[in-house]
Image (tube, rainbow, N blue to C red):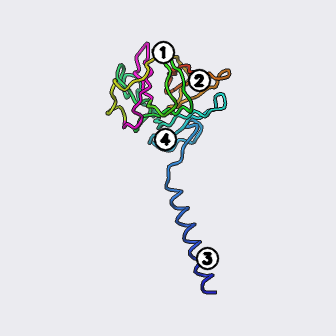
Amino acid sequence: MNSILKILLTAITFFFCFDMAAQKSEEVCYNPNLIKDTTKKSIKSMAYALVNGDSIKINYHSPGVRKRIIWGGLVPFDEVWVTGAHDATTLEMPKAFVVNGKEMPAGKYAFFTIPGEKEWTIIINKHWKQHLASEYDEKDDIVRVKVKPSTIEHTERLQYFIEAGRTNTGKIAVAWEKIKVEFPFIIKN
């Protein structure tokens, strides 16, 4: 009976410790604009989609507007921005893909932008493990795409979207405050 009690107590202790560790880990939010917003912190978020059977992921931190001036204020115009908060936003592609005519191998990349009043530059950079844009180096850019921002309804938290198109095509978009930018991609077979 004593050994059964020891095993039972060990199992209870293990599950209690495991549960505590699981609660401390950060949860990932797939739609930061649908949750009750009770934090001033940037929310760890992910956009995920299947395009032609392949999973594409974007990991980012989603800051909130919180009555701040975003464009030309919190996010300066004409400067490289991490397009989120904290670490660089990452784009994970399972197969080779094409953006703006440039073919890139499957892998993990950093996603940056240079917001402008009338035009933005979308940047895919090979150095994905960066904090903010402080380690950013233009020489590591793989592709740059010029896009025009569009006006949208107010979006409180920054959010990425991956939209599947026909067969092996899709679009990546990011929206925040009243601005949205997007660009197309093609998955190579």
- The amino acid pointed to by label 3 is Leu
Mark 2 and mark 4: Cα distance apart in space:
32 Å
Q: Residue 11's x, y, as percent?
A: 59, 72
Q: Which one is closest to the eye, mark 4 or mark 1?
A: 1
Q: Which residues are magenta?
A: 111-131
Identify the residue under disc 3: 8
Q: Which one is closest to the eye, mark 1 or mark 3?
A: 3
Q: Which mark is residue 147?
A: 1
- The amino acid pointed to by label 1 is Val
- The amino acid pointed to by label 2 is Lys
Q: Earlier in the sequence, mark 3 or mark 4?
A: 3
Mark 4 and mark 1: Cα distance apart in space:
26 Å
Quarter of image, res 34? top right
Q: Residue at x 48, y 36 (%)?
A: 60
Q: Earlier in the sequence, mark 2 or mark 4?
A: 4
Q: Which one is closest to the eye, mark 2 or mark 4?
A: 2
Crowd band around label 2 with a 10 angstrom C-alpha radius: few (<14), some (14–19), many (20+): some
Q: Are marks 1 and 3 in contact (CB under 8 Å)?
A: no
Q: Residue 19's x, y, as percent?
A: 56, 61
Crowd band around label 1 with a 10 angstrom C-alpha radius: few (<14), some (14–19), many (20+): some
Identify the residue under disc 2: 188
- The amino acid pointed to by label 4 is Ile
